[in-house]
Amino acid sequence: MPEASVDASTLIDWGVASSALPGQTQSGDLHLVKPVSTGVLIAVVDGLGHGAEAATAARTAVTTLDRHASESVLALLQRCHWALKGSRGVVMSLAFANPQQNALTWAGVGNVECMLFHGHGATLANLTRVGLVTRGGIVGSELPQVRAQIVPLAAGDVLIFATDGIREGFSDGLPFEAPPQQLAEHILSRHGKGTDDALVLVARYRGGTRTGG
């Protein structure tokens, strides 16, 4: 019998903003926030190129992640690689928040940027940033050797994913005290390139509970 999942809203507040390349009806940039028994999986997927083929590849990846969300981030990358054989392929970043350990496990292939900001309650100048180190490659055709990284989480930490439709430097001067949905919309409206699909996902960690048994 499957274990009951946690409620994502008890672990994170999150929001997402996205746009398709002008002239296209579908975006190849998709996301997934999926609670499972041990925490919550957060993923952003960017299908190579744009248009229908990119969207199809991204949907295949998201469907695969949704079906197997309780597995490790490295196992999920491998499953997506198998599922996407023969497709255009994707780049993607995955993060799993574990409330029992107050830890984030993350991994990525390609150029979906993922950053974690620590410093809730501090001045914005005192925020510290940790960036996910991704490996070049394509999930579906050129999967590199990837190592998962584990970083500590504290209540109030902010996790931001951004696809390559967002310009670099988007976190400079960001009003981190704002709600995640407002932050995502702020980044997209001010830093979207307008020449590609774009997606921003922002999640604020509520804090875990270290309970026994």
Image (cartoon, rainbow, N blue to C red):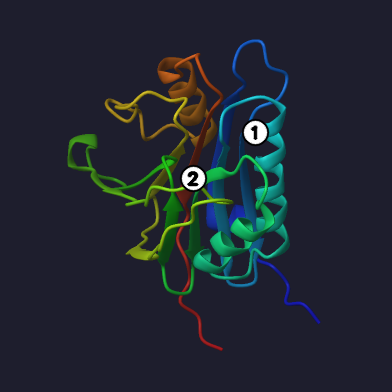
Question: What residue sits 35% from the left and 64% below the top?
Answer: 149
Residue 203: image tag: 2
Q: Earlier in the sequence, mark 1 or mark 2?
A: 1
**Which quadrant, please, contains the C terminus?**
bottom right
Question: What residue sits 73% from the left and 19% below the top?
Answer: 25
113 and 14: which one is in front?
A: 113
Residue 173, image x, y percentages: 28, 25
183 and 69: which one is in front?
A: 69
Q: Residue furthest left?
A: 126
**Which quadrant, please, contains the N terminus?**
bottom right
Describe the element under mark 1 as helix, strand or loop.
Answer: helix
How many marks the image carries: the answer is 2
Query: Label 1 belongs to which residue?
Result: 54
Q: The residue under label 2 is which amino acid type?
A: Ala
Question: What residue sits 65% from the left and 27% below the top?
Answer: 27
Above or below residue 158? Residue 3 is below
Residue 200, image x, y percentages: 50, 33
Q: Classify residue 57 as left or right of residue 125.
A: right
Neighbor class of circle 1 (other Cα within 10 Å; few <14, some 14-19, many 20+) is: many
Q: The residue under label 1 is which amino acid type?
A: Ala
* Picture quadrant of residue 83: bottom right
Neighbor class of circle 2 (other Cα within 10 Å; few <14, some 14-19, many 20+) is: many
Q: Residue furthest right?
A: 1
Above or below residue 107? Residue 30 is above
Above or below residue 73? Residue 192 is above
